Amino acid sequence: MAIGLLRGAAAGAAGSTALNAAAYLDMVVRARPASSTPERTVEAIVGRVPVSVPGRGAARENRVSGLAGLSGILTGVGVGAAYGALRRLGFRPGPLAGAVVTGLSVMAFTDSSMAGLGVSDPRTWKAMDWVSDVLPHLVYGAVTWAVLRALDDVPA
């Protein structure tokens, strides 16, 4: 099982990098600003736990921004690890289905977390909002699943 978790974590790291690249490319193509949703999510979490982010002004904002980025990486690596373990247990859909299931599940995890925290309400999103969310997550799924499949050929 440890091999599956480690391979999945590596695949999730690759997928997270691809997701970030897709999001940055979208920013370049559409000249859109970076999303503030990750930082707002961190703020919502901090508001619910007995921990605070130290500092004031720019120092605190920079820490929140760092935590937001780290939380995205942690989510991508964690979901990858889970799929690595599932793959080790025999969950082996084809390349397209594996990519779609992996991408949509990480998207569902992040979007439901934001909705549960009151940061965003996907029910109010416009079509372009959905496209902007779905495409990078499908890229994550495709890369994560491709790396998992490639690692099948590496001896344990």
Image: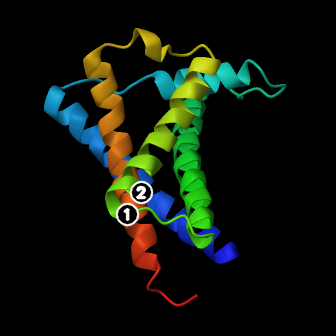
Q: Is residue 61 left or right of residue 35?
A: right
Seen from this angle, which residue lies furthest bottom? 155
Q: Is residue 55 left or right of residue 66?
A: right
Which residue is pictured at 57% across the width and 19% down the height?
115
Which residue is pictured at 35% across the width and 27% down the height?
34
Q: Is residue 45 left or right of residue 123?
A: right
The amino acid type found where label 2 is placed reads: Gly
Q: Which secondary structure lies at badge 1?
A: loop
Image quadrant occupied by the N terminus: bottom right
Snapshot quadrant of residue 36:
top left
Query: Is the residue marked by circle 1 packed among few (<14), some (14-19), or many (20+) residues within 10 Å?
Result: few
Q: Is residue 109 above or below residue 128?
A: below
Q: Which secondary structure lies at badge 2?
A: helix
Q: Is residue 140 above or below residue 152?
A: above
Tell me the residue that label 2 is attached to.
Answer: 98
Q: Are marks 2 and 1 in contact (CB under 8 Å)?
A: yes
Q: Is residue 3 above or below residue 77?
A: below
Residue 94's tag is: 1
Query: Is the residue marked by circle 2 packed among few (<14), some (14-19), or many (20+) residues within 10 Å?
Result: many
Seen from this angle, which residue lies furthest top? 124
Whole-percent x and y of residue 119?
Answer: 55, 16
Nearer to the camera, 42 or 154: 154
How many marks overall? Answer: 2
Q: CA distance from mark 2 to mark 1?
A: 6 Å
Whole-percent x and y of residue 87?
Answer: 55, 67
